[in-house]
């Protein structure tokens, strides 16, 4: 209870803490304008093939979490009932044994790339959460070859039918981008995750992002931490897709689980607050 009160207090402080200024406003406005131009110029009719079993490009940004990557994200991907996929894992300058562990897995569908680590944001605990994975995620989007794209974070879990149900839902509803309901675990309790409501549109967890591959031209925003709201990179990404007119849907069948990492009790930025010294040392030292 004491820990939860501390988290609540820190969350309230974070709501007041913003660097939203003229520079930030200009950057966000410019990004939206560019996104709209890119989206308008897309030849979407020719960019989506009519394959019966289209290739799905899955990607995971990661940093020095070899064990949990293997036990959660990789295991979730390899047990999918839908088998026609490529899996791109991008290390954000990993210095542990991530590459060794990934390359030990005998599956040609898995590719690992380790990019140089570049921190392009103000160094503090919340910004690690807001934009930490952006560089690796954007690099992954440069490499995708499939007709559809799916994201899974290294510490999240999919049900076996996540890809199949997401693909069917998106195609049957003639959508371009979807998210899904999921479950999260906090302090030993399993909770049905409520969707975020962004400009009237429901949004599920980032690890449920599933979309048509022509949208890979829309990248994650390394400056989202400077905004006054929707500062987390995946929230900003969703908000921008909505603003440029992408057809978005929400799948009510839960196919994603967000579980505390080993030795931890909660998830998301709450755990970053609880373990701030550990995470500052790991990501910014």
Image (spheres, rainbow, N blue to C red):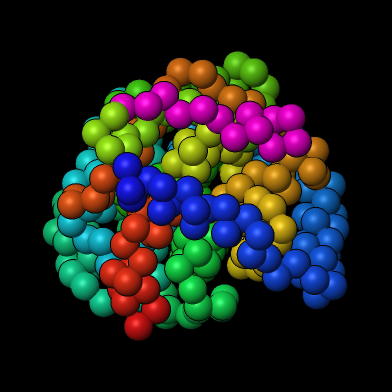
Percent from the top left, x then y, of residue 134? 53, 63
Magenta range is 190-202
- Is residue 94 in sight in this rendering? no
Where residue 93 appears, x then y in whole percent?
36, 76
- In this rendering, position of residue 208 left or right of residue 48: left
**x and y percentages locating residue 241 in the rendered image:** 71, 44
What's the residue at 49%, 57% (across, down)? 10
- Label count reads 0
Q: Position of residue 152 (x, y in %)?
A: 40, 45
Residue situated in front as seen by the camera: 86 or 185: 185
Q: Residue at x 68, y 65 (%)?
A: 18
Identify which residue is drawn at 65% across, 51% down.
230
Q: In the displayed orientation, state which residue is furthest to the bottom.
A: 285
Left or right of 31 in this view: 13: left
Q: Quadrant of residue 16?
A: bottom right
Q: Nearer the viewer, residue 138 or 88?
A: 138
Where's the N terminus, which quadrant? Answer: top left
Magenta residues, dominant SS class: strand
Evaluate whether residue 165 shows in this view. yes
156 or 147: nearer the viewer: 156
Q: Is residue 5 above or below residue 254?
A: below
Q: Quadrant of residue 232?
A: bottom right
Of 192 and 136, the residue lying toward us: 192
Q: Residue at x 74, y 30 (%)?
A: 200
């Amino acid at each position: 209870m004491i820990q939860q009160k501390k988290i609540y207090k820190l969350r309230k402080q974070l709501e007041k803490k913003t660097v939203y200024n003229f520079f930030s406003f200009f950057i966000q406005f410019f990004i939206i304008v560019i996104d709209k131009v890119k989206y308008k110029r897309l030849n979407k009719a020719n960019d989506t093939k009519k394959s019966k079993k289209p290739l799905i490009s899955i990607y995971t940004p990661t940093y020095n979490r070899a064990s949990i990557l293997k036990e959660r994200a990789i295991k979730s991907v390899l047990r999918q009932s839908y088998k026609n996929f490529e899996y791109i894992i991008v290390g954000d300058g990993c210095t542990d044994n991530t590459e060794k562990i990934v390359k030990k897995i005998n599956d040609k569908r898995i590719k690992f790339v380790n990019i140089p680590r570049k921190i392009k944001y103000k160094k503090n605990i919340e910004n690690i959460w807001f934009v930490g994975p952006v560089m690796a995620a954007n690099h992954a989007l440069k490499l995708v070859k499939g007709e559809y794209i799916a994201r899974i974070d290294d510490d999240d879990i999919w049900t076996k039918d996540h890809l199949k149900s997401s693909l069917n839902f998106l195609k049957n509803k003639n959508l371009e981008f979807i998210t899904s309901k999921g479950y999260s675990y906090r302090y030993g309790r399993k909770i049905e995750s409520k969707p975020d409501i962004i400009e009237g549109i429901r949004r599920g967890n980032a690890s449920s992002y599933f979309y048509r591959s022509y949208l890979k031209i829309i990248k994650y925003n390394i400056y989202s931490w400077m905004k006054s709201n929707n500062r987390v990179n995946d929230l900003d990404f969703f908000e921008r897709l909505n603003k440029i007119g992408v057809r978005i849907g929400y799948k009510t069948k839960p196919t994603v689980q967000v579980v505390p990492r080993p030795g931890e009790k909660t998830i998301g930025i709450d755990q970053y607050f609880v373990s701030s010294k550990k995470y500052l040392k790991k990501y910014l030292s």
